Image: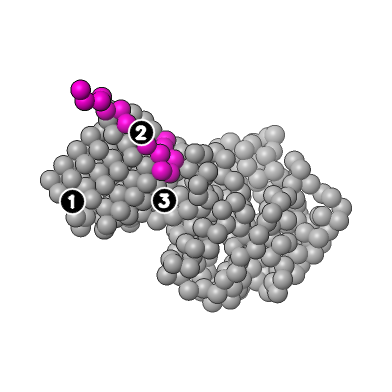
C-alpha cells in the first residue's frame, strides 16, 4: 500500500512558530506531530510500498527530519508550489501511483483502526468523528445501506454530524486520480481549491462504494490552544516519562515529558509540560506548556505557553507564545 501525507500548507494559525519550521514538525509530547502520525503506520497490517510526502513551505526540513527519524519506509517528496487544494496535492503524486492508497493529513492526532482496509470489500473508507456542530467541517451523508452518498463541506444544517477527520483509504488510486483529473478539467472548485471531498463524490456517482470508520480520538493541532490540548491528551495516554526523568533538585507533577538531554534544575514542572531535547529550565515554575528544543528558561513562571526552538525566556510570569530563536527578558537590569 502507498501512503500519501500532504504537508504543504503554511500553518498560518500557528505563527510565529511556522515562520521557521513547518507545522508538522511542531513538538507535542516530545515528538513532532509528523512523528506521531508515522507511528500510526505500524498499525497497518500490510507493507508500506512507498511513503509520499507532499511538501511546500520549508519542505527540506520535513525530508531532513524523516531521514534522521529512524523510520525506514521507502519514501519520496513531491513539491506543491501552488496551493491549489487537497485533490491537487494528491494529483501531483500520480507518478507510479497505483493500487490501494492511504491518505493522512497531519492537522490532527487520532486513534483509529487501520487494519483490514484491503479486505473490507469497499472502494474507499473515510475516517470520521461525530461532532456537535458540523458547520466547520466536511461531513458525510449516509444512505440507508450504511454507505456514503456524498460529502458536504461546511453544511448549513445540523442534520449530518459525521465529520471527516483527514484520513482516507482508497482501494484504486487510479480511479481517484481520474476523478481528480475530471475535477480539474471541469474546474470544479470549492472556495477556489480542488477538494478531495468533491473527487470522492464523483467516484460515488460513478458507482464507488465508500464506507466510514469512526475514530475514538480526534485532537487538533491547528492552533496554539489546540496544540496544548493535544499535548495534554498524549501525556495522559502513554507519553509521560516523569518517573524516569533525570532532574536536579526539582519537583515533577505528572504527567510530563522531559527529554533525556534536557536539563531541569531547581524547578517545579507540571502537570502537562513537555521539555524537549537540549532545553534548559532553571529556577522556574512551568505548567501546561511546551518548551521546544534548545530553549533556555530561567527564573520565570509559565502557564499555557509555547516556547520555540532556541528561545530564551527570563523574568516574571507570562503566558507566552514565543517563536524559534526569540529572546524574552523581563528581569530588571542590575545597577
Where is mark 3, residue-wise?
Answer: 27
* Helix, strand or loop under label 3: strand
Q: Residues within 10 Å of mark 3 (few under 14, many from 20)?
A: many
* Helix, strand or loop under label 1: loop
For the question of whether residue 167 can be seen, the reply is no
| Span highlighted in magenta in the image | 321-335
Query: Residue most toward the front?
Result: 335
Where is mark 1, residue-wise?
Answer: 247
Question: Which residue is nearer to you in this view: 68 or 216?
Answer: 68
Q: Nearer the viewer, mark 2 or mark 1?
A: 2
> Residue 301: horizontal and vertical position, in percent?
27, 32
* Helix, strand or loop under label 2: strand
Q: Residues within 10 Å of mark 2 (few under 14, many from 20)?
A: few
**At x 26% / y 47%, what residue is drawn?**
280
**At x 51% / y 58%, what residue is drawn?**
61
Q: Earlier in the sequence, mark 3 or mark 1?
A: 3
- Tell me, what colour scheme is on the image? one colour
Amino acid at each position: 500500500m502507498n501512503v500519501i501525507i500532504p504537508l504543504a500548507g503554511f500553518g498560518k494559525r500557528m505563527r510565529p512558530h511556522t515562520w521557521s519550521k513547518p507545522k508538522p514538525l511542531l513538538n507535542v509530547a516530545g515528538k513532532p506531530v509528523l512523528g506521531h502520525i508515522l507511528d500510526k503506520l505500524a498499525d497497518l497490517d500490510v507493507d508500506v510500498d512507498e511513503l509520499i510526502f507532499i511538501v511546500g513551505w520549508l519542505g527540506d526540513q520535513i525530508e531532513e527530519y524523516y531521514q534522521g527519524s529512524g523510520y525506514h519506509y521507502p519514501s519520496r517528496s513531491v513539491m506543491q508550489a501552488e496551493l491549489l487544494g487537497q485533490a491537487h496535492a494528491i494529483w501531483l503524486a500520480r507518478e507510479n501511483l497505483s493500487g490501494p492508497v492511504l491518505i493522512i493529513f497531519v492537522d490532527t492526532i487520532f486513534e483509529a483502526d487501520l487494519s483490514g482496509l484491503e479486505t473490507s470489500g469497499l472502494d474507499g473508507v473515510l475516517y470520521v468523528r461525530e461532532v456537535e456542530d458540523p458547520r466547520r467541517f466536511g461531513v458525510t451523508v449516509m444512505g440507508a445501506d450504511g454507505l456514503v452518498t456524498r460529502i458536504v463541506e461546511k453544511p448549513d444544517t445540523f442534520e449530518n454530524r459525521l465529520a471527516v477527520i483527514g484520513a482516507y483509504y482508497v482501494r484504486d488510486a487510479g480511479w481517484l486520480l481520474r476523478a481528480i483529473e475530471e475535477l480539474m478539467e471541469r474546474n470544479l472548485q470549492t472556495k477556489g481549491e480542488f477538494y478531495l471531498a468533491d473527487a470522492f463524490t464523483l467516484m460515488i456517482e460513478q458507482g464507488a462504494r465508500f464506507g466510514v470508520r469512526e475514530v475514538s480520538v480526534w485532537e487538533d493541532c491547528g492552533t496554539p490552544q489546540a496544540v496544548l490540548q493535544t499535548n495534554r491528551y498524549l501525556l495522559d495516554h502513554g507519553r509521560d516519562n516523569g518517573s524516569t526523568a533525570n532532574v536536579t533538585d526539582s519537583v515533577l507533577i505528572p504527567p510530563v515529558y522531559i527529554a533525556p538531554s534536557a536539563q531541569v534544575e531547581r524547578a517545579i514542572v507540571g502537570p502537562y509540560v513537555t521539555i524537549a531535547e537540549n532545553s534548559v529550565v532553571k529556577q522556574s515554575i512551568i505548567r501546561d506548556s511546551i518548551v521546544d528544543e534548545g530553549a533556555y528558561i530561567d527564573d520565570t513562571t509559565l502557564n499555557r505557553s509555547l516556547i520555540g526552538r532556541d528561545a530564551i525566556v527570563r523574568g516574571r510570569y507570562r503566558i507566552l507564545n514565543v517563536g524559534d530563536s526569540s529572546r524574552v527578558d523581563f528581569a530588571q537590569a542590575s545597577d
